[in-house]
Amino acid sequence: MVMLETEQTDNSKKRAAAKQENESICTGKVSVAQGQVAEPAMLTTISFNKKELENLLEQERERRQQLEWQMAFMQIASQQQQEMLLATKNKMVLAAGLAKLGIWEYDPTTKLFEFGDEFYALYATNAEREGRFMSFEQYIKEFVYPEDYWLFEEEKEFLVSGIGESIFKDFGHRIVRRDGIVRYIVVRRKIARDANENVVRIYGTNQDVTEWVNAEQERQQQAATIKNMAYFDSLTGLPNRQHLNEWLTKELDTARQQQLSGVVMFIDLDDLKMLNDTCGHSFGDKIIIAAGKRIVDVIGNKGFVARVGGDEFVVVLSGRYQREAIEDIAHKIGKALGKSQRFFGKNFHLAASIGIALYPENGDTTEEIIKNADNAMYAAKKFSKNCWRFYEEEMQIEAQKKMQLIGSLRYALQRGEFSLVYQPQILTSEQKIVGFEALLRWRNHEYGIISPLQFIPLAEQSGLIHGLGKWVLLEAGKFIRRLTEAGYPEIQIAVNISAKQIIADDFITIVRNTIKETGIKAAQLELEITESVLLTSMEEVIKKLNKLKKLGVKISLDDFGTGFSSLTYLRMLPVETLKIDKSFIDIITTDMQGAKIIDSIINMAHTVNMKVVAEGVETQQQLEYLQHNNCDLIQGYIFSQPIGAEKALALLVQGKNMG
């Protein structure tokens, strides 16, 4: 009982002390209870007056208010962040739509794809209709074009069998949208792995590339058409000279390495020019087509047949042939060509002269073997026509005559035998003269008028082209000066330049001196190059042409379409104008379907900001076709034949136009 009372007394004392302590706090005074030993830090009595207590309470209210503001700010910031994330997502969805991208995920665990609305938009449907999750097999069944099922065999192996070790590649396939339209899709993906290199997700995109695929197919088709145009004769469909040169060069390289041999036949149709003159070119074209077919029928797959000129064909037979076997083939060709043919109600018997050269005995380069076969053909034609001749050293007599012609060339400049004539170039849209092409003519006192096709190659072979070309540039510059003084400074004069001239070390200097000496502007002079320059040092030629362009000289590509290399390097050359070869203009009147090749050339040139000149325009039908297809300039007999300087100036003065 005593203990209980003592405990009750102690409790009463504690309650009294606590009450006193509370009262002290309320009055701002705190003291140490009596009878207790205080710690050293608590010996000081802490007291607050009313003012200080109010300050403490005010500070507490401010702290609480600041916390409330911070919480409100954080809520606002969180809301803004959510809005920004939503805006970013909307932008990404919009960008995906513009790029025709559909985003997807693949879960290797569930083996399901997850697709959203932006993905299904490519398929003309939505997630509500299709569901957000779809298996690999279901995707193929629902959307893949049936003929492309096989493309997914490897893809399924990637996804299902050892996905962690697979190397993913972009691949394309066709789809069938819900509206039935077929589109082209490219699939790209990215693997996500965990810390243990296990695949946890595959993220990918499907992109609709239909427009790109269609454009690429059209581009490839146009390239194939132009390549076919460049390597095959438009009239007969046979390989052309360019094709023959490339093929025969490879054949001779193989023959040289493996010690093989072969035969080259040069075939020239007799009297075709007379037929063209008397019966018309349409008749002659029919003869050429029939001749090509009959030669092919004889040769079959034993050799290579090409048409290399108006009435000229070349046959190459690989392998060693006995002389009797070669004669038998030549006889069969002659016999096939001699069969009666009926065109336009007329019966006709064709004949041909054939020259035969053997390689490597009669030449081991393309140029040499064809030249010797050509010499043999001329020997056959000279002998009696409608026969064949093997190349012999005696045929060098003809080569000797060529040397005599070269001898005359050496003195032609001194004798004043050369002259320039000018053929107008007409701006199609305005039907007015905007330029002339300067053409070289040679009238020899012994041989008379000699064709440029005959003496220009001889000048190049002999090296005389450099002096002759320098003279042509100077004379053309003088004529430009006359035109300027007569009030026609806008007229350009185009001068043909050979590959031999361009690669000469002093060519740039010659052009620069010509401009300076004649006092003309560089822009008044246009230099026409042919695709043969591309067979020389490409890097050197491009470098020089760029220097000429910096001078202000205009550059044009002549005889475009007779070779293929220019298509490859066209963007590399500083060319401003393309001149379509006459052989393509001629087919306008004979093959309107084939004439669409011209459309391709014009469109291609305009795409790269080049002008187009059509050479050899002779008929109203050709003119109207070219006008309809937006050819920039025309040149040909329909307007004017090449004329002398005085007549050319008079033509400008008279203001003659195409009307």
Image: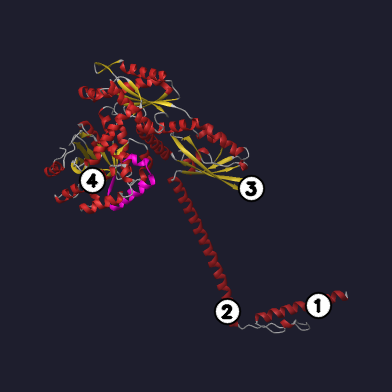
Disc with the residue nearer the chain's start (4 vs 3): 3
Q: Is residue 457 shown above or below 93? A: above
* Magenta-highlighted residues: 529-555
Q: Which amino acid type is marked by label 3? A: Glu
Q: Which residue is mark 3?
A: 197
Q: Of circles 4 and 1, which is in front? A: 4
Residue 331 visible somewhere in the drawing: yes
| Residue 182: % across, % down | 44, 34
Q: CA distance from mark 2 to mark 3?
A: 62 Å
Instruction: Using a 10 Å C-alpha cutoff, classify the residue at mark 3 as few (fewer than 14 neighbours), some (14 to 19) or many (20 or more).
Output: few
Badge 2 or badge 4: first in the primary sequence: 2
Q: Amino acid at mark 4?
A: Trp
- Nearer the observer: mark 3 or 1; the answer is 3
Q: Amino acid at mark 2?
A: Asn
Q: Could you tell me residue 405's position as x and y percent?
A: 25, 35
User: Which element type, helix, strand or loop, lies under badge 4?
Assistant: helix
Q: Based on the displayed image, in which of its 4 quarters is residue 565 positioned?
A: top left
Marking on residue 471: 4
Residue marked by disc 1: 10
Q: Nearer the viewer, mark 2 or mark 1?
A: 2
Q: Is residue 74 left or right of residue 491?
A: right
Residue, disc 2? 55
